[in-house]
Every structure is written in structure tokens, then in C-alpha cells.
Amino acid sequence: MRETLEFRIDEKDARRFLQSEDGEVLGPMGHVRKVVLDSSDSRVEKIRRAHLELLQQGSSFFTYWDIRRTYTKKEWEAAELLSLHIRNAFEPEGEVCGTRYDEAVACAHCGVGARQLNELRLDPSSLPRGKDITRTIAYSEILFSARLVEALRAHGMTGARFLPVLSKDGRRSLDGWFQLEVTSRPLEVTPPTRFGVGPFDPDERGEYRCPRGHIPGLSILTELSVRREDWDGADVCAAKQYVGYRSRNGGAFRPYPLLLVSQRVRKLFGELRAKGFDLEVAHLV
Ligand SMILES: [Zn+2]
């Protein structure tokens, strides 16, 4: 496995802490430096120190971060389950288009467990083109393209139901898209999986952790490991724990599940050249 970290850094700060040859300056204004490093690169430590220094001043060294992992063919083939990361989102979210939620049944700390009361309703013109998996900016409303759903059904893939998506007025169903509902047994997340606010911030104060255990952190920082005995053999699964957060005061964000798919699904997605997501090797322990 090869792991790379990407950072976007304000050019003023980048000049203070990095060499001019570290990364590339983006855009015509030249205000942002993009730095992509192998996780073993010694400059990662340099960025960590700069970040901790600025964090103490209530600031942040980078404005964006991302971790990507690539694998050899052998590593891909050996995986039993893969974690699925959706790489695109659109707005507006379901709630402003007439989707209703029962918040009374949700966890008072983290918002996990809010129940969707009607079909997912969306603005048809907001859906992305050229994607097979997407989600709204609420994060928890996940959609699969009709061609993907058709293929999953034709191949007898288990562990998911695909529900119709309706237009805002509820009068017609949206062609081409279905909402994902995972029906397989949830998988307990196990060590060495780590969560945090960012690559150098394990959230020691527990700002984003649910005291009742629903959410271990804002983001997953490592590959995902889950308990083997929980896996019922389904092709589409979700971890028992969620990530993200429920925004208060009218914000759109909801906690969302960590999704997993089987090797059979990985191969099918490959054959279909399905788009809109990344896969990573997950571990059953
Ligand atoms: Zn909770």
C-alpha cells in the first residue's frame, strides 16, 4: 500500500515553513500551495510541526487535506472487503426538498439514528452527470445510478436495498437514481483504525466523539478495520460506527456511515467503469 497526503496551504504560510520547490502554486493569483507527499516523506513531519505551531495560535497551517491510498494488483486481489469513499457531493440536500426526518429518535449527542420518514426528495436538476455513486451535502443521503443498481441486482449482490428518489413535489420519481439503504449486519470498527479531525489532530478533547460510542471521530485517518465475526457475507455493508457530525442551527450535515463492498462488487464496478468514488482495502480482524 502506498499512502499519499495532500495539503492546500496559504502561500504566505507555505513560504514561512517550506521551500519554494515543495509542491506547486495553484491558480492565477498564486495564493494557494498544493503539496502532495508520500506519508513516509520527511516533509510530512515539517508540515505537522508547522501545523501544531499555528494551531496554538488558533490558526491552521493548511486549509484542506486528503489522504489517498493505492495498491498493487496482488493487494487488490487479496482483499475480502473494500471501503468505499464517495468523492463527490451535490446540493441542495433532501431536507430542503421535502424529505422529512424524525429527529426525536436520534442520539441527543451526535444525531445518529434520525429516521427518514418519506422517500428521498431532491431537485432533479441538481444531480451530477457522469457519476455512478454520489451523495448530497448532508453526506448521509447516498445515491447509486440506475445502471449500477441494475448490474448489482443482475449479479445477485446482497446487503442493500435501492429506494426510489422523488422530485421535490413528490409527483415523479427521478430517472437514473436510487437511494442506497444498507440492510446487512453492521460491522464493528476495530483497532488499528484511527479517527480524528485531521492527519495531525486525534481530537484529544473528544469534540467530535459521541460519548455513547456512535461516532469515534470526525474523519477516518487510516484504512478501515472491522470485526470479522460481524460480517454476514453480504456484498454491501456499513460499519456500526458513523463519522462526520450533525450540524445544528439549520446546517445540512448529518453523520454518515462508512461503507464497504465485497471483492465481487469491486470487480463489477471495475467492469462497468463506475465513477464518483474510490475504493481502499479494508481489513477483517
Ligand atoms: Zn451518539
Image (cartoon, rainbow, N blue to C red):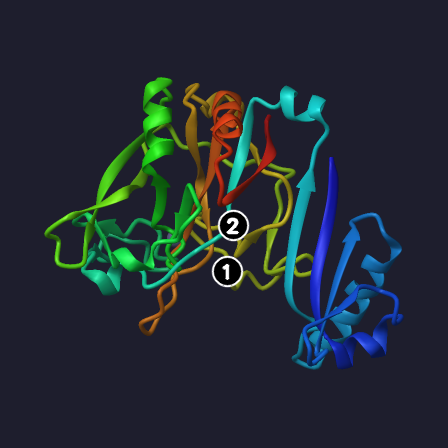
Where the N terminus falls, by quadrant? top right
Question: Does 92 sit above or below residue 210?
Answer: below
Q: Which residue is mark 2?
A: 87
Question: Does 87 sit above or below residue 259?
Answer: below
Q: Mark 2 belongs to which amino acid?
A: Arg
State the image coordinates of residue 107 (x, y, percent, origin top left): 32, 54
Q: Gap in Å between the C-alphas at discs 2 and 1?
A: 22 Å
Q: Is residue 181 left or right of residue 255?
A: left
Q: Quadrant of residue 175?
A: top left
Q: Which residue is mark 1?
A: 208
Which residue sits at x=70%, y=81%?
A: 57
State the image coordinates of residue 23 (x, y, percent, origin top left): 80, 63
Q: Is residue 119 left or right of residue 70?
A: left
Disc 2 under 8 Å from ligand 1? The reply is: no
Label 2: few (<14), some (14–19) or many (≥20) C-alpha neighbours in 10 Å: few
Closest to the observer, 177 or 255: 177
Label 1: few (<14), some (14–19) or many (≥20) C-alpha neighbours in 10 Å: many
Q: Is residue 138 left or right of residue 87?
A: left
User: Looking at this rendering, what residue extends furthest in the left direction?
Assistant: 171
Q: Mark 1 belongs to which amino acid?
A: Tyr
Closest to the observer, 185 or 133: 133
State the image coordinates of residue 83 (x, y, percent, origin top left): 54, 36
Which residue sits at x=64%, y=44%?
A: 222
Question: Does 34 sit above or below residue 105?
Answer: below
Which residue sits at x=39%, y=53%?
A: 128
Q: Secondary structure at mark 1?
A: loop
Closest to the observer, 17 or 24: 24
State the image coordinates of residue 248 (x, y, percent, origin top left): 35, 70
Which residue sits at x=35%, y=44%?
A: 143
* Mark 2 or mark 1: whose residue is earlier in sequence: 2
Where the C terminus falls, by quadrant? top right
